[in-house]
Image: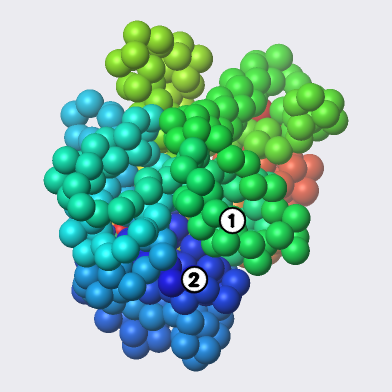
Amino acid sequence: MRIVMIGSGYVGLVSGACLADFGHHITCVDKSEAKIDALERGEVPIFEPGLDAIIEHNRAAGRLDFSKKLAAPVAAADAVFIAVGTPSRRGDGHADLSYVYAAAREIAAAVTGFTVVVTKSTVPVGTGDEIERIFREEFPSKDIAVVSNPEFLREGAAITDFKRPDRIVIGTEDARATEAMREVYRPLYLNEAPLYFCERRTSELIKYAANAFLAMKITFINEIADLCEQIGADVQKVAKGIGMDKRIGDKFLHAGPGYGGSCFPKDTLALVKTAQDYDSPMRLIETTVAINDNRKRAMGRKVITACGGSVRGKKIAVLGLTFKPNTDDMRDAPSITIVQALLDGGATVHAYDPEGMEASKGMLGPVIYGKDPYEIAEDSDAIVLVTEWDEFRALDFKRLKTTVKTPTIVDLRNVYSAAEVSRHGFSYFAVGKKSSA
Ligand code: NAD
């Protein structure tokens, strides 16, 4: 099939590269000239493990190309996917759909013959209906079916998630579109990928319901963690104990500094707004959003407490900035709020992240970057582990002990245990489990 991907970011580029790997011919389009120029030079503008090899392989095979303009590839396409951003709208928290509608209009103007237009972007319920209305009223002669096909991939594991998904949700009741979508994903049948067809509005809501549920699960275990600290229980053992119950499951039960990233914060907020608009408020999610917002700043206070109640004039070494490991994505990362709280408290913040430092510039205040954990930890009053990159999982505490000013570690991801860290003379503060001061 000839497929065009509009938007070549974390979702569009991964989806485009993987669909090319399935054997389709893909053109990835983006308005950002810098992004397309980089891709054409053979550079991958985002960090996603394994993506560069798939792009290189499929470009060489002639199945994947890039373009700044959509008209020519869309005119020849069987299906066009919209994978542009849907950030929170400034002011009210609704999803900003301006990029989606702008792309839809450009696509409709370029379409020739029957074409399936697929929203892969996360869009609120009714967006497909609105796109269809735009097509019907502004482009009445065009033969287009509008389909919802939300994406569930996780950054850092995006290739595997796209190629071996738990499910592929497709919202359409149009027979020709159903056929086309089966064809798009046919190569996945070998892996018995479960295609799940439903109405378009249902499909749109599935994406928000899934993200809101996961955000709620994280927030639940974070509150249990707070209680553990008060009563002397261990949240990791509680999580294991409840996760062994198949009705609960053991995923998304890691206590930490609060969820962040490019999806959960904006999608929970957008669902809350949609629910309010339909006079069907979702109090669980409203509360989830509020708890999570408070939590990030509270993690800054946790560090301050670990430093004896003040960080004024102290040097804090922050390990990890991205919202999770194996990505360079800094959108809504908890580190942003934590670092701000430390700067507000008068600390000097030194930071290191394996992939996120470039993206973090402009998002953090006056932070001093270092080349590795050991450099930034020199003379520090506390080391704060914010993102659990692999290279922070086996720190050389013996070496660190000789260079830090005060041996204190605040482990916001529960990578270590009090026993193993205090053995080296460090005070250890974790989330929802025993600390050793
Ligand atoms: P992104 O910001 O990385 O990429 C979006 C790209 O679209 C940008 O490169 C931008 O330049 C481009 N763009 C915007 N308008 C355009 C237009 N009219 N024509 C061509 N290009 C245009 O965003 P992302 O993280 O890939 O997310 C895209 C969508 O997928 C969002 O709705 C998001 O909620 C959803 N989603 C994201 C993830 C994730 O992990 N990032 C996972 C599932 C779903």
* Quadrant occupied by the C terminus: top right
Q: Residue 125: x and y, percent?
A: 38, 30
The residue most toward the top is: 279
Q: Say above or below: 299 vs 367.
A: above
- Between 352 and 336, which is closer to the camera in this rendering? 336
Dot 1 falls on a residue whose secondary structure is helix
Task: Quote the CA–CA distance across marks 1 and 2.
Answer: 11 Å
Q: Residue at x 47, y 88 (%)?
A: 62
| Three-letter amino acid code of the residue under disc 2 | Met
Quadrant location, ligand no. 1: bottom left
Q: Residue 304: x and y, percent?
A: 45, 34
**Which labelled disc corresponds to residue 1?**
2
The residue most toward the left is: 138
List the residue tagged with mark 1: 182
Q: Residue at x 76, y 21 (%)?
A: 233
Dot 2 falls on a residue whose secondary structure is loop
Res 433 quadrant in image: top right
Q: Residue 328: x and y, percent?
A: 44, 61
Ranked by sequence position, the earlier of labels 1 and 2 is 2
Q: Is residue 60 left or right of residue 161?
A: left
Do we see residue 431 in this rendering?
no
